[in-house]
Image (spheres, rainbow, N blue to C red):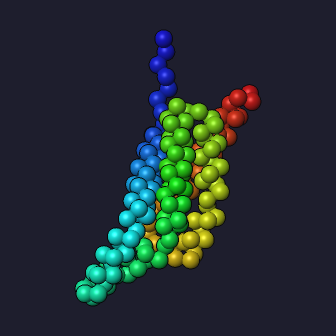
Amino acid sequence: MSQPEPRPRALVAIVIYKCFSVGLLTCVAIGLFLTSKKYDSLFTFAEEYMMTGKREIIKAGLTQILSVSTTKMQLGAFVALVYAAVNGIEAIGLWNQKAWATILVVGIVGITIPVEIYEIIQKASIVKFVVFAINIAMFIYLLRHALAERQKHQK
């Protein structure tokens, strides 16, 4: 019985990144669902706390949160959960070295690159640059991998 080929380090790194994304998106979804359920309590708390005028940062943050309707919060939570599920499926497929997973990741990352560029142009931040750089590296690696596999199967 032969040993399976070891997974390339870049592939392992991508799977870890995808798993991290699943965790982060799941936390965001849970936070949005909980916030939408406690919206009235949060609004009352914010009004009382903002009256004291203590911290402008908290006031600005709560104002931003409370300007979003509960419906939008719940929709955002649902979208985050769906995207977390897609990331989970991608991670499992990549870990098992499935061709469909490579194509799925390349397609999804390829679609989001123009959106990420637009967001960076609108309001640049270190986090956006880092995520963009990771996505570009992941896209290039998986695209090369997919093309190499295709050439191997054509011979």
Q: Is residue 136 visible?
A: yes
Residues 101 and 51: in front is 51
Q: Total number of numbered labels?
A: 0
Seen as rendered, the residue at the extreme top is: 1
Give the percent coordinates (x, y) of residue 6. Answer: 46, 29
Give the percent coordinates (x, y) of residue 55. Answer: 27, 83
Seen as rendered, the residue at the extreme right is: 154
Give the percent coordinates (x, y) of residue 66. Answer: 43, 75
Q: Which residue is found at the position 52% from the left and 31% from the top?
A: 96
Q: Is residue 145 visible?
A: no
To which quarter of the image does residue 57 belong?
Answer: bottom left
Image position of 89 (left or right of 60): right
Residues 150 and 73: in front is 73
Q: Which residue is found at the position 43% from the left and 52% from the top?
A: 26
Q: Which residue is found at the position 29% from the left and 87% from the top?
A: 51
Q: Image quadrant for the C terminus?
A: top right
Image position of 54 (left or right of 13): left
Residues 112 and 41: in front is 41
Residue 111 versus residue 99 in the image, above or below: below
Q: Which residue is found at the position 47% from the left and 42% from the top?
A: 15
Give the percent coordinates (x, y) of residue 150. Answer: 70, 35
